[in-house]
Amino acid sequence: MTENYLLQVKNENTRLDKFIAEKISSLSRTRIKELIKEKHVLVNDKKEKTSYQVHEGDEIKVTVPALKPLSVEPENIPLAIVYEDDDVIVVNKPQGMVVHPSVGHPDHTLVNALLYHTKDLAASPEGFRPGIVHRIDKDTSGLLMIAKNANARTSLEQQLANKSNKRLYLAIVHGNFTENSGLIDAPIGRDHYNRKKMAVVENGKDAITHFKVLEQFNGYSLIQCQLETGRTHQIRVHLAYIGHPVAGDPLYGPQHTLKGHGQFLHAQVLGFTQPASQKWLEFSIDPPQIFEQRLSELRETK
């Protein structure tokens, strides 16, 4: 059912989204931003931006629409579950699997498999991605955390927003490096010329990727990337931007590349605070066989 809140600002002087988050603990910052964008939040009966500074005397009306019913069906698809408790599931997503349904991929997704595995998944505003708090691309393999209830979803989303979780990726990239590590700080937005692609653009969203060179081969390198932000296609865009596109990347890389099943990018390490116990959990998973095979072949060329 739809929920309505009426908030009175007394002596606060803070951002609108932060103020609402402090007053309505059941709403995540991500969900609040969605509500503001969708005009479900009014300040003195007017629509304001997320960054609006609330003032004493402001009256804030928040309408939380009822969640849409699930539009996806459970499917008996094998899942590689790395860890599970009452609040979270950690899965190792294979290359080729889409995380949640979309117009182009209505079924056979990770969400379909999760719904077959358990009925305990945190509801999502859209209905078609229960439990999902972050994503990796279809042809990127590796670790994802799934929320099983609303409190877990809020906690995991806040950890992503606060950058307090840990996400390390392995990538085979084109070219060799003169430095052992680096930081890419370049804003990302929709490509002005190709709407299917993202790009480094002047007015894009802040995006920061750290990288460390692990091995170098003949024309390729193995690197580790750590995300500080989580923009769409972030690692792929950033590495292409500095002239080291991910090998096998059909969207951002060259045609002459390593043969495989898409980009050689793997979410290797995932760490976060367990929502209920507040204990730190950390998991590591080896890359898929095709990734290891190409690495072995590259090592033979050194």
Image (spheres, rainbow, N blue to C red):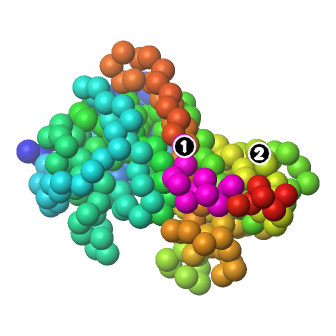
Between residues 59 and 224, which one lies in front from this camera angle?
Answer: 224
Whether 130 is drawn above or below 100: the answer is: above
Mark 1 packing: few (<14 Cα in 10 Å), some, or many (20+)?
Answer: some
Q: Is residue 224 left or right of residue 22?
A: right
Q: Which residue is mark 2?
A: 214
Does any portion of residue 47 appear in the rendered image?
A: no
Depth check, front residue: 266 or 31: 266
Mark 1–mark 2 distance (CA, rounded to whole Å): 15 Å
Pointer 2 local density, CA inside 10 Å: few below 14, some 14–19, many at least 20: few
Q: Outermost residue toward the left?
A: 1
Magenta stretch, overall SS: helix
Seen in the picture, residue 295 relative to 53 is either above or below; the reply is below
Q: Position of residue 267 (x, y in %)?
A: 53, 47
Left or right: where 110 falls relative to 272: left
Residue 29: image location, x then y, percent: 40, 40
Question: Mark 1 against mark 2, which lies toward the viewer?
Answer: 1
Q: Toward which corner of the image does residue 244 lie, by quadrant?
A: bottom right
SS label for mark 2? strand
At a point 81% along the width and 66% down the height, the residue shown is: 219
* Residue range (magenta): 286-296
Tell me the residue that label 1 is attached to.
286
The amino acid type, in three-letter code, at marker 1 is Asp
**Mark 2: amino acid:** Leu
Q: Residue sitting at 53 percent across and 35 percent down?
A: 284
